[in-house]
Image: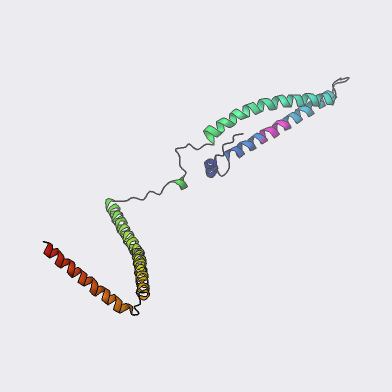
Amino acid sequence: MSVNPMTYEAQFFGFMPQTCMLRIYIAFQDYLFEVMQAVEQVILKKLDGIPDCDISPVQIRKCTEKFLCFMKGHFDNLFSKMEQLFLQLILRIPSNILLPEDKCKEIPYSEEDFQRLQKDFEQLQEKYKTELCIKQAPLAELEEQKIVQAKLKQTLTFFDELQNVVRDHGTSDFRESLVSLVQNSRKLQNIRDSVEKESK
């Protein structure tokens, strides 16, 4: 028997082609056994009518079984060839054939329908891009907020350290120290500017 599943043929016929061939094989085999049994019964009846016959029913049975094996061997050989022909030429759907339920539905489209579908597709694509940008904007803003928070944290850390330095030098008011520092830095900047002008 063939090992090819032939599922597409089973979909079309409603049964597997191999199963069909197996049933045919069993039917032929049963018919062969029935014929040989009938022939054996006829031979036994004929022998009963012959006086002083040396052939016993056991010998007849052995000869029947031997002939049955011979016939079955030839039958199996012929059936295997017949099965190949059936599975290749009769119970097989060619590869270029589609079943009606598997065919694509043919819907006629005009040029206007195609243009309209293309326009709808482009609009949907633009809408998708817009929604994608809207979703990405909060993410970008969140990243910017993280960067600002990190810089603010660095600034606060710097002021804390600066306040500790001021306290270590005996100044209690941090604001006054900061104002004094700014004034001194401006004085130094003015002195530097005047020195640069004189040097020219």
Image quarter of the C terminus: bottom left
Q: What x and y, as percent, mark residue 196?
A: 14, 63
Q: Is residue 184 left or right of residue 68?
A: left
Name, please, the residue furthest toward the right: 52
Q: Is residue 197 left or right of residue 93?
A: left
Q: Quadrant of residue 133?
A: bottom left
Is 37 located above or below residue 143 in the figure?
Answer: above
Point out the stretch of residues depicted in magenta: 26-33
Q: Is residue 200 left or right of residue 81?
A: left
Please identify the dominant SS of the magenta region: helix
Q: What x and y, as percent, mark residue 116?
A: 29, 56
Which residue shows up at 55% across the image and 30% down it? Answer: 85
Q: Quadrant of residue 37?
A: top right
Is residue 171 rendered magenta in the image?
no
Image quarter of the N terminus: top right
Is 130 located above or below residue 114 in the figure?
Answer: below
All told, the count of numbered labels is: 0
Front residue of this view, candidates 34 and 47: 34
Front residue of this view, candidates 3 and 36: 3
The colour scheme is rainbow
Q: Is residue 27 left or right of residue 176?
A: right
Which residue shows up at 59% across the image and 29% down it? Answer: 82
Which residue shows up at 53% across the image and 41% down it? Answer: 9
Q: What x and y, as percent, mark residue 5?
A: 57, 39
Q: Quadrant of residue 164?
A: bottom left
Q: What x and y, as percent, mark residue 13?
A: 54, 42
Is 102 located above or below residue 56 in the figure?
Answer: below
